Image (cartoon, rainbow, N blue to C red):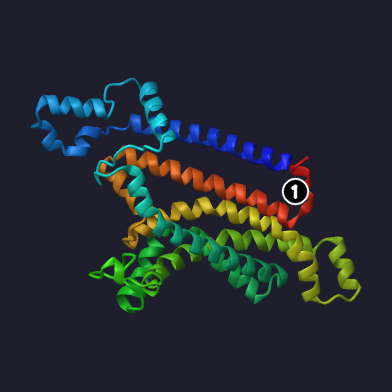
Amino acid sequence: MANIALRVLEQALKLVLVLIAVTFLAFALVEASPIDPVAAYVGSEAADHMDPAQLERLREYFDVGTPFLERYANWLSGIVRGDMGVSLIYKEPVIDVILAKIGPSLGLMLTAWLFSGVLGFVLGVIAGVYRDSPADKIIKGYSLLMASVPTFWFAMLLLIVFSVWLGLFPIGLSVPVGVSASEVTLADRLYHLALPAITLSVLGVASIALSTREKTVDILEQDYVLFAKARGDKLGKIVRQHVLRNISIPAITLQFASFSEIIGGSILVEQVFSYPGMGQAVVSAGLQGDAPLLLGITVVIAVMVFVGNALADVAYGIIDPRMRRVSHG
């Protein structure tokens, strides 16, 4: 029990240090940008004609003119209290905007993450087991092609083909147009989620499939596998007993590492499909100078990536008890 508590404390400390580093860098980049929070909040023309007293109150509210370290400390203390500031374009608390956007984004990212992981793993094993076969060449060619295709271009291609030409999927959004929230069904949401999730999944398969293939080939060339073949073990038994067991941990490592790529890809995919998630919000915030929203989403994404890596550690211990014993001393 003490080991578990120590492990949790260690992970919590790591999270704090990561957040401090990420937020400091993000805050410094925003500080270096030409964003004027007052002009972004009320509009540049309105700011030029605003009463000087009101303008000064807004400048004080947004800490304009305050030294960088003091501004960062004030913002960070607000984060600790759960106050991420007010979005300049939505005119709402940043935390409320994120809570409204994170649901659709998580649904999209988790669906694509799981599907790309499973499909990439299966294709990688098939390519490695049947090395140099037509199936291997097709999988390698597909993976190399997808690894070189820009996300936004591929998303627009699928949108044109399957939504505009064939009419199989809606052109955009996460729910039907003109339907109240109470009337939107789960089937409607899944229907609108399908094409963006497929786009992310198909692109995310490449790295997982190629890595799994190489690891599978390496294992099949090991002496203990050659001995099993000489003993008369069938290919299916060799794959179950030797290949899957030895590539599971590397596959999990790559799968959780790919979550950050899924997050980055979702920003572009959401923009192409007009999917109302955090990706579309962060693009709008960047284009319109909404620094509080940019910083708030940065914090959330950093936490999501860290949690993904922490879950990978837990999965390691479940799959390989030896790693759990080592990690706990």
The residue that appears at 47% across and 59% down in the rendered structure is 109
Image check: 192 left or right of 289?
right
Mark 1 secondary-structure assignment = helix
Rendered-image quadrant of the C terminus: top right
311 sits to left or right of 99 = right
Residue 43 lies, with reference to residue 148, above or below; the image says above
- Neighbor class of circle 1 (other Cα within 10 Å; few <14, some 14-19, many 20+) is some
Question: Which x, y percent locates residue 10?
Answer: 64, 36
Residue 282 appearing in the image: no
Q: Position of residue 53 (x, y in %)?
A: 13, 24
Q: Nearer the viewer, residue 162 or 108?
A: 108
Q: Residue at x 32, y 71 (%)?
A: 184
Residue named by callout 1: 324
Query: Left or right: 142 with respect to 43?
Result: right
Residue 59 in picture, x, y percent from top left: 22, 27
Compare residues 329 and 254 and report the one nearer the observer. Answer: 329
Q: Position of residue 17 (x, y in %)?
A: 55, 32
Q: Nearer the viewer, residue 183 or 33?
A: 183
